[in-house]
Image (tube, rainbow, N blue to C red):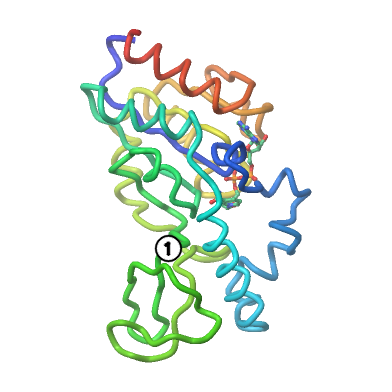
C-alpha cells in the first residue's frame, strides 16, 4: 500500500460497539430503548425536552463507564505513523477516538461532550447534566441543548469532508450501516472521484455494493489488521 497518500476514514456506531455502546441496529432500530424519532429529532426535542435532555445526560454519563477498544487505538496509531494525509470522520457522538489517542477527529454529528446554546448559537465544551437547565457559559441563557446533529439537521463541516474526499485515494468505512445520509453517500462520492473504497463491518452494509472491497468481522480485529497493512508492518 505504499502508493496510498490520502486516506479518509469514516466511522460509525459499530466501532464503539465492542466498548459497550449500543448501535441502532443491535437495538433493533431503538437507541438504548428509545425510538429514534423521540430522542434524535428537533420535533422530539420540542415535544418533550425533559425526555431528550435526560436521555443525552445519561449517554454522556455512560461515557465514564466505557473504554476505547483496539479499533480506536489502531486508528490513533495510523494517525501517528502514516506519512500521508489522514482524516478521521466519525458519525459517533462519543469521545472514544480521542481517548484512544487520535487528535484530529471530525465529529460530523456533534459530540455528547459539547453543548449548543439555542439563544446565542455558541458551542461550548460540556461535561455536566443539562436537564436542570444550566446557563450558557457565553450568554447566560438557560437554553442549552445537546450539540448533537439530529435527523433533519445539517451535519458539521461538510465542505471540509468533501474536500478531503476529492483528494482521497482511499476511503475506508468502519462499523456503519450505510443507512444515514449524507455519510452513507460518501463511498459513492469518493469512488466517483477516483478513490479505492474499503468497508470493514460486522456484516455487509446497505451500501456494500459501492465498495471495491468489503471485509466482514469485528472492528477490534479488522481495523488493527488493516492498519498494519497500510503501515507495512
Ligand atoms: P448503525 O447502528 O446504523 O450501524 C452500525 C453498524 O455497525 C451495523 O452495520 C453493524 O453491523 C456494525 N457493527 C456492529 N458491531 C460491530 C463490530 N463489533 N465491528 C464492526 N461493525 C460492527 O450506526 P451508524 O451507521 O453509525 O448510524 C447511526 C447514527 O447513530 C449515527 O449517526 C450516530 O451519530 C448515531 N449513534 C452514535 C453512537 C455512538 O456515538 N457510539 C451510538 C449509536 C448511534
Q: Is residue 26 left or right of residue 66?
A: right
Taking the spot 65% from the left edge, 68% from the top edge, the residue there is 39
Q: Which residue is mark 1?
A: 113
Locate the C terminus by quadrant.
top left
In the picture, residue 5 is in which quadrant?
Answer: top left
Q: Is residue 70 left or right of residue 116?
A: right
Q: Is residue 79 above or below residue 222?
A: below
Q: Is residue 63 above or below residue 150?
A: above
Q: Is residue 66 above or below residue 218?
A: below
Q: Nearer the viewer, residue 57 or 146?
A: 57
- In the image, is the residue at mark 1 within 8 Å of ligand 1 by its beta carbon? no
Taking the spot 75% from the left edge, 49% from the top edge, the residue there is 27
Residue 189 is situated, as x and y percent measured from the top left of the image, at: 44, 36
In the picture, residue 48 is in which quadrant?
Answer: bottom right
Q: Is residue 151 left or right of residue 27?
A: left
Q: Nearer the viewer, residue 88 or 132?
A: 132
Q: Nearer the viewer, residue 86 or 23?
A: 23
Residue 75 is situated, as x and y percent measured from the top left of the image, at: 39, 30
In the picture, residue 227 is in which quadrant?
Answer: top left
Q: Is residue 106 above or below residue 222?
A: below
Few, some or many residues within 10 Å of mark 1 (<14, 14–19, 20+): many
Q: Nearer the viewer, residue 132 or 168?
A: 132
Q: Quadrant of ligand 1?
A: top right
Amino acid at each position: 500500500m505504499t502508493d496510498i497518500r490520502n486516506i479518509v476514514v469514516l466511522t460509525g456506531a459499530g466501532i464503539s460497539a465492542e466498548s459497550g455502546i449500543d448501535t441502532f441496529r443491535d437495538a433493533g432500530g431503538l437507541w438504548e430503548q428509545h425510538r429514534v424519532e423521540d430522542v434524535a429529532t428537533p420535533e422530539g426535542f420540542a415535544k418533550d425536552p425533559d425526555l431528550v435532555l435526560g436521555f443525552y445526560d445519561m449517554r454522556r454519563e455512560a461515557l465514564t463507564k466505557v473504554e476505547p477498544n483496539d479499533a480506536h487505538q489502531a486508528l490513533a496509531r495510523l494517525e501517528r505513523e502514516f506519512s500521508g494525509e489522514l482524516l478521521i470522520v466519525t458519525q459517533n457522538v462519543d469521545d472514544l477516538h480521542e481517548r484512544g489517542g487520535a487528535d484530529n477527529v471530525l465529529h460530523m454529528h456533534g459530540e455528547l461532550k459539547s453543548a449548543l446554546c439555542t439563544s446565542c448559537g455558541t458551542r461550548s465544551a460540556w461535561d455536566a447534566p443539562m436537564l436542570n437547565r444550566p446557563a450558557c457559559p457565553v450568554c447566560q441563557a438557560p437554553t442549552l441543548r445537546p450539540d448533537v446533529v439530529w435527523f433533519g439537521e445539517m451535519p458539521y463541516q461538510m465542505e471540509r469532508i468533501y474536500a478531503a474526499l476529492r483528494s482521497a485515494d482511499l476511503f475506508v468505512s468502519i462499523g456503519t450501516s450505510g443507512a444515514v445520509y449524507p455519510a452513507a453517500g460518501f463511498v459513492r462520492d469518493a469512488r466517483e472521484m477516483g478513490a479505492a473504497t474499503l468497508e470493514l463491518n460486522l456484516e455487509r452494509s446497505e451500501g456494500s455494493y459501492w465498495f471495491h472491497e468489503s471485509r466482514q468481522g469485528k472492528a477490534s480485529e479488522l481495523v488493527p489488521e488493516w492498519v498494519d497493512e497500510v503501515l507495512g508492518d
